[in-house]
Amino acid sequence: MIRARILGTGSYLPADVLTNADLAARVDTSDEWIIERTGIRKRHIAAAGEFTSDLGTAAARRALDAAGLASADIDLIIVATATPDQTFPACATVIQHKLGMAGGVAFDIAAVCSGFLYALSVADALLTSGAYRTALVIGAETFSRLLDWEDRATCVLFGDGAGAVVLRAETGTGSNQDRGILAHRLHSDGRYNDMLFVDGGPGSTGTVGKLRMKGREVFRHAVTNLAAVMAETLAVIGLTPADVDWVVPHQANLRILEGTARKLDLAVDRIVVTVDAHANTSAASVPLALDTAVRDGRIKPNDLLLLEAMGGGFTWGAAAVRW
Ligand code: UT7
């Protein structure tokens, strides 16, 4: 059977850093409140003229280098983003062009903070079907451009960044000891559209709009849904939380990460945490965390990783990956 294996990871963060103290100078908040309620200490913000496609291209180049491949080896690019440079063309085709590619297929997926999990799952399906051989899956966002910088309840939570992985179709045995993507489960429930949304768009207001969120409700659903989909994904391959070496979660709030781990009886030191340094980078947060833990040596060959995310829609999902 075919397995989609991750051959390399890469990430990119814009140079400008915005600290909690910087935010406290703009809105009625404090470093103490932000750290205590979210775990966030700083976030990166894209420079004027620096677009989501630039962040995604930089992350993709680093992932290709790590995999030892060139863009000419890629036949599939999927970009998860809610902040494309333009309404269309797809950010994926912009990145395809910036990587100097003329072949292959490139398209975007919109599932907000769950976007990387959705993109990874679609790439897995397209690779394991035999239709494509080598894929770039990218999560790239400039959420700073969607924020209402006067709303202290949301502007302190997000940052910009990008992460990418290179996946290749390889032969596996079909057992849960294979290296590569072993299972994924996705969910969405549009009844909750109004809990986390942007109040504009090309087909309604003709404006970009600003992010709006009912934070407490999102928090409650996140812990419940994430714990459920993580257990569900492991059950597909006959494994349990005790088998997991590293949880690589969407980085929205440290309390969500810890609350979810507690529900599954997972030790908190098994969670890769980057929310302190990156804040919530939406679709970029899972591949940014993955790249961080791969490069610092925490993630080792044959480790079992559980990736998870939850976001606007609601959308949520998880993937089990043997490294
Ligand atoms: O990617 C997925 C999407 N996002 C999330 O997963 C985020 C989910 N939600 C959360 O992370 C949390 O709900 C928040 C961090 C957004 C808020 O934390 P909370 O503990 O749920 O606080 P709260 O919304 O219940 O607000 C508590 C108080 C309020 O004041 P009152 O009404 O009690 O007087 C807020 O007005 O904190 C106030 N507050 C702030 N105070 C200082 C809200 N934002 C701030 C702020 N600084 N930045």
Image (spheres, rainbow, N blue to C red):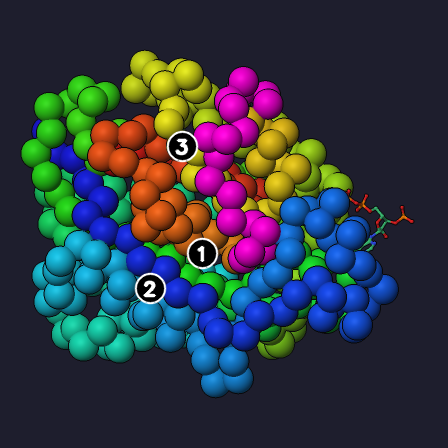
Left or right: residue 194 compared with residue 97:
right
What's under tag 2, amino acid-wise?
Ala
Q: Compared to 307, does 238 lie above or below?
A: above
Label 1 belongs to which residue? 284
What's under tag 1, amino acid-wise?
Ala
Give the numbered dot on residue 246: 3
- Seen at 66% across and 37% down, the residue is 255
- Seen at 36% across and 39% down, the residue is 298
- Seen at 12% across and 34% down, the residue is 2
Q: How far apart are marks 1 and 3 (CA)?
A: 18 Å
* Quadrant that contains the N terminus: top left
Tell me the element at label 2: helix
Q: Looking at the image, is mark 2 or mark 3 earlier in the sequence?
A: 2
Which residues fall within the magenta stretch? 262-280
Give the numbered dot on residue 59: 2
Q: Mark 3 vs ligand 1: CB under 8 Å?
A: no
Could one spot residue 234 in this view of the protein? yes
What's under tag 3, amino acid-wise?
Trp
> 21 or 232: which is nearer to us?
21
